[in-house]
Structures are given as C-alpha cells and as structure tokens.
Amino acid sequence: MPSANPQALFLVDGYNVIGAWPDLQRSRDTEGLEAARRDLIEALVGYSAFHAYDTRIVFDAQFQGNPGSREVITQNLSVCYTDYRQTADTYIERSCALFRQDLRKFEQRLIVATSDRAQQLTVVGYGAEWISAQQLRLEVETSVQRVRSKQKQKRKSQSRFLANAIDPIAQQRLAQMRFGIRSDESR
C-alpha cells in the first residue's frame, strides 16, 4: 500500500525509454508501439510500488488531434498523454517548473528518467534529479530481484517448522495423539 506522501514524484519520458531498452525496442518493432507502451507500464508498476513513487509515464501525443489525458493505472502509476502540439519534453519541463514552486519540494524528491541530454540539463536546472533510461532499466531489474528474494525468504521462513510440511490429516492425528484422544482408526 502506498504511503500518503510518496517518496518521490517520478516522471518517465516514455518513448525515450522505449527507444533505449532493447526488449522494448524489440516489442515495438515486432508487435507495435501499443505493445511496447504496455510492456513499459508493466515494468514500472512493481518498481513504483516498491519504491513508493508517484510515477507518471509521459507519452507524446503532439501529432494527435486529441486533448491531453491522464490514465490512472494503479495508485502509484499513471500514464500521461500530452496535448496536441506538446512534446513529452515540454510536459516534463513544465512539471519540473511547477514542482519547483510547490511546497512538496521540501518533503518529496522529483526524479526524471530520460536519456535525452538536453532534457537532463534542463530538469537539473529546475532542481530535479535525473536517471538515464539504462539506469532505470537496471534499477527495475534490481527491484524485481529484491522482491523475489524477499518472497523466497518469506516462503522459506513459513516452511521452517516440520508441522507446516505435514498434510492436514496427519496434523489432526498428531494433535489427537498429543491430547490423548484416540481416533476411530486406531481402536
């Protein structure tokens, strides 16, 4: 469950990341752009929850005749499509400028994921942190491994006791023996 105040506002330049991750490039080239977007969203759902980030994946819609929109995927992740004639870069820059004037900046980090060097310099100028698309890929993979490790440890600790490994009928018969109750089968 996400905390009331996310640890960071995390803006992701969607098409930039799709172009930088080999598996997303392959998905885009074989199955289409929609499949690559879906794969990116799936990759960032768990990452955002794990780090308690308010993640917004930003996609250009500058050549579409539609107004900008925001689709909420989970409590930690939403997808933003820019307005007509607006790029993801200008959307992210505007968000950074607004965040700079926001009081949340004292309690929350602002991180931007992009490999666009000009964009990196701009967002740092607004006081945001940035990570490259490749660094994001590594962080997503690392968080997946950490979650799996925690789940494995949890399963391991639950099966630590012999009683957890015995089937329910045998557990019941052992309980009866412990309390001196004779079962019908042993008479």
Image: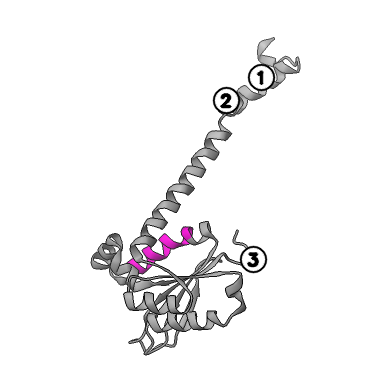
Q: Residue 180: x and y, percent?
A: 75, 14
Q: Quadrant of residue 187?
A: top right
- Viewer-side residue, 164 vs 168: 164
- Viewer-side residue, 162 vs 60: 60
Q: Say whether marks 2 and 1 touch (CB < 8 Å).
A: yes
* N-terminal label among 3 and 1: 3
Which SS class for mark 1?
A: helix
Q: Which mark is residue 4?
A: 3
Q: Say whether marks 3 and 1 touch (CB < 8 Å).
A: no
Q: Which mark is residue 166?
A: 2
Q: Start and end of the magenta stretch?
A: 36-47
* N-terminal label among 2 and 3: 3
Which SS class for mark 3?
A: loop
Which SS class for mark 2?
A: loop
Q: How far apart are the alpha carbons under marks 3 and 1?
A: 47 Å
Instruction: Give me the residue at 38% from left, 66% from top.
Output: 38
Name which residue type carries label 3. Ala
